[in-house]
Image (tube, rainbow, N blue to C red):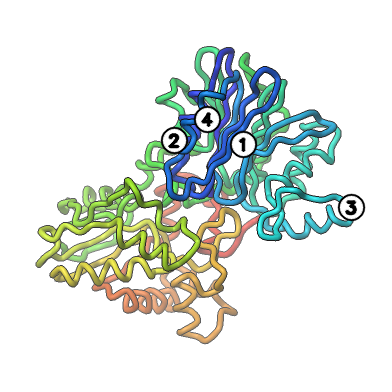
């Protein structure tokens, strides 16, 4: 996915941008970048963070950084920030999201005899494409509107100029941006958890498609928010940080409610409840509290040297990461009836090995309660649950095996339907689980606390706005 952070202050703000960007590291493990306006000139650094934490890679750069404005990014797409010299002036830009019509927009540029210098593996850099779309307009304000009108998918971005900082949330608000303040400084971030320890208090969430211009003295809206929002539901279910809030709704509290909703429909007899760390923990605590069943940790997670397991691009590496970082506590497993809450079942390959390992250690029963419905449609907005294979999702494998076709996948997404029950049973058998019960879509939506029409539920229903 990725995350962005920016700051403008009446004094040096390098520490704020450095640590604020670092607080987005849970959103990606491929690249990080920083840019500052130093004595009227832009300076930047970009590093690969696949095998090293963000802080350790950038600490050596801090000595040459200074400035009263800066931006940072955690990116799992292209190297960022970019420094662009144009008729709009020189600016730095960072982006997060997914541009589904990247090839089409690239082709349009080629037809105008334009070119790109930041290409990666014969593909256009999304950030450079955004910069190109910005520079097709007569002003940055018009350029931001041009980007949002042209991009199909999702794109939020920050633009650092010599006059101040621009922040633009994607047209349908799938990626959050929050504006915050402290004495003499303003900041904008993808994750609100990046703000309190740096002394910032939240001022507002940018609306869908809204763009603001920020200086050390304050901010103003330059492009008003739209009236339609489709914020990503998985922010609360999976990859959002527990201390963050989006649209005023805290992640951990929402996960607790999700777990309680799962418990309200469950009567299975178990000895203990646990969460698949990390995101499953909040769901499990809610479940355990609601049913008054002991919460324990039969798995502990070794995190110092292992990245999030969905990040590496190679499936074998993902499976290795998942296996190596979860260490079982045998004394809490042998002879027990265990119930696990998990954020979701995506491919199922990692979970399958984990379940078998529990039985190998003597577990009597292993029950699974995912906090969301069965995933049937790969994400087309945030690169989550995306794969080269159309059958990467366990739900789609089940549909194909049951029917020999993916022509009517939406029929299997209906709560309480025979098709949904058949898919669930297929996955239960494949995983080797004693029982498997998915969260209902309505219960998940209610636990989050926003109307369903304001949430992107494409992964489960296949219905979305581009």
Do the CB atoms of the residues marked 1 and 3 lie less than 8 Å apart?
A: no
Question: Mark 4 — residue?
Answer: 61
Q: Judge whether residue 427 can be spotted in this image.
A: yes
Q: How many marks?
A: 4
Residue 326, horizontal then vertical, whole percent: 27, 57
Question: Mark 3 — residue?
Answer: 113
Q: Is residue 376 left or right of residue 318?
A: right
Q: Residue at x 59, y 31 (%)?
A: 71
Residue 379, horizontal then vertical, whole percent: 55, 60
Based on the displayed image, in which of its 4 quarters is residue 142 positioned?
top right
Question: Mark 2 — residue?
Answer: 55
Label 4 secondary element: helix
Camera-side mark, 2 or 4: 4
- Which residue, as the protein is rendered here, is positioned at the far right? 112
Q: Which mark is residue 207?
A: 1
Label 2 secondary element: helix
Q: Which mark is residue 418?
A: none
Residue 439, horizontal then vertical, whole percent: 38, 61
Q: Is residue 221 left or right of residue 429?
A: right
Nearest to the observer: residue 75 or residue 441: 75
Nearest to the observer: residue 418 or residue 294: 294
- Which residue, as the protein is rendered here, is positioned at the far bottom? 404
Indicate whether 243 appears above or below 77.
above
Query: First in sequence: mark 2 or mark 4?
Result: 2
Query: First in sequence: mark 2 or mark 3?
Result: 2
* Mark-to-mark CA distance, 1 and 2: 31 Å
Q: Is residue 283 left or right of residue 327?
A: right
């Amino acid at each position: 996915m990725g995350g962005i952070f920016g700051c403008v202050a009446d004094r040096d703000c390098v520490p704020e941008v450095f640590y604020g960007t670092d607080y987005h590291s849970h959103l990606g493990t491929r690249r990080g970048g920083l840019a500052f306006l130093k004595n009227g000139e832009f300076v930047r650094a970009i590093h690969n963070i696949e095998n090293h934490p963000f802080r350790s890679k950038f600490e050596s750069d801090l000595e040459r950084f200074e400035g009263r404005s800066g931006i940072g990014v955690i990116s799992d797409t292209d190297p960022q920030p970019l420094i662009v010299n144009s008729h709009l002036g020189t600016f730095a830009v960072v982006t997060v999201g997914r541009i589904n019509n990247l090839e089409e927009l690239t082709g349009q540029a080629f037809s105008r005899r334009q070119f790109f210098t930041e290409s990666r593996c014969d593909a256009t850099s999304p950030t450079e494409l955004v910069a190109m779309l910005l520079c097709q307009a007569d002003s940055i304000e018009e350029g931001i509107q041009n980007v949002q009108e042209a991009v199909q998918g999702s794109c939020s971005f920050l633009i650092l100029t010599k006059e101040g900082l621009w922040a633009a949330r994607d047209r349908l608000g799938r990626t959050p941006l929050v504006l915050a303040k402290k004495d003499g400084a303003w900041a904008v971030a993808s994750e609100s958890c990046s703000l309190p320890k740096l002394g910032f208090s939240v001022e507002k969430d940018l609306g869908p498609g809204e763009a603001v211009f920020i200086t050390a003295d304050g901010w103003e809206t330059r492009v008003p928010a739209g009236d339609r929002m489709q914020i990503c539901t998985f922010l609360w279910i999976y990859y959002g940080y527990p201390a963050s809030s989006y649209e005023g709704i805290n992640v951990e509290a929402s996960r607790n409610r999700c777990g309680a909703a799962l418990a309200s429909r469950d009567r299975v007899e178990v000895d203990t409840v646990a969460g698949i760390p990390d995101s499953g923990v909040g769901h499990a605590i809610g479940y355990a509290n609601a049913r008054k069943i002991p919460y324990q940790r039969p798995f502990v997670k070794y995190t110092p040297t292992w990245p999030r397991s969905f990040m590496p691009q190679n499936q074998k590496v993902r499976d290795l990461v998942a296996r190596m970082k979860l260490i079982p506590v045998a004394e809490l497993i042998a002879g027990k009836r265990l119930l696990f809450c998990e954020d979701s079942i995506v491919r199922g390959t990692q979970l399958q090995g984990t379940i078998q390992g529990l039985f190998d250690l003597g577990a009597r029963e292993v029950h699974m309660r995912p906090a969301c419905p069965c995933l049937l449609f790969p994400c087309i907005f945030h690169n989550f649950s995306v794969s080269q294979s159309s059958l990467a999702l366990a739900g789609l494998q089940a549909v194909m095996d049951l029917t020999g076709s993916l022509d009517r996948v939406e029929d299997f997404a209906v709560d309480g339907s025979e098709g949904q029950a058949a898919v669930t049973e297929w996955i239960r058998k494949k995983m080797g689980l004693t029982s498997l019960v998915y969260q209902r879509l309505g219960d998940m939506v209610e636990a989050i606390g926003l109307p369903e029409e304001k949430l992107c539920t494409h992964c489960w229903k296949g219905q979305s706005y581009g």
